[in-house]
Amino acid sequence: RNCEGMFIYYRDGALEKPLWDEVERTISDYFAYPGVREWWATRKHWLTDEFRAVVEAIISKNPEPKLYAAYNLDASSKA
């Protein structure tokens, strides 16, 4: 819901585009993971139609998982 609140601020002109772009990148990072997408399928009805459309547009870009890339989690599981 925090991201939806920031979207509303952006839509209404209270949040500048560079800050909204950061929020969009965060959403994209989260939704690159299958578990988050599964959660979304069961909880998206909590949010407004307008914000759901924003998230669905981000998901449709099929973002690559990068959120945990800096931690080399794949490498540690192969050791």
Image (cartoon, grey):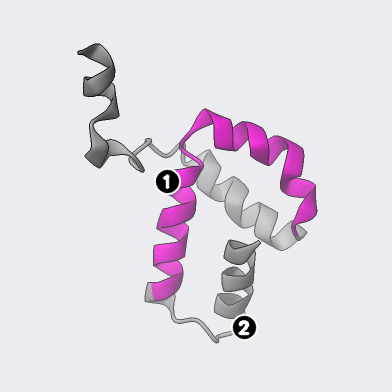
Q: Residue furthest bottom?
A: 14
x and y percentages locating residue 35 in the rendered image = 56, 31
User: Against 30, is 4 above or below?
Assistant: below
x and y percentages locating residue 66 in the rendered image = 33, 40
Image quadrant where one finds the C terminus: top left
x and y percentages locating residue 65 in the rendered image = 38, 36
Viewer-proximal residue among 70 and 57: 70
Image quadrant where one finds the N terminus: bottom right
Horizontal relation, residue 68 to residue 31: left or right = left
- What is the number of the mark on residue 78? none
Query: Callout 2: 10 Å neighbours few (<14), some, many (20+)?
Result: few
Residue at image x 57%, y 37%? 36
Residue position for label 1: 29
Q: Earlier in the sequence, mark 1 or mark 2?
A: 2
Residue at image x 76%, y 60%? 48
Horizontal relation, residue 70 to residue 38: left or right = left
For label 1, the SS is helix
Residue at image x 41%, y 74%? 19
Residue 31 located within the stretch drawn in magenta: yes
Please name the amino acid that badge 1 sits on. Asp
Residue numbers of the magenta segment: 19-47
Of the residues tagged 1 and 2, which is closer to the observer? 1
Horizontal relation, residue 19 to residue 76: left or right = right
Residue position for label 2: 12
Please name the amino acid that badge 2 sits on. Asp
User: Against 34, is 27 above or below?
Assistant: below
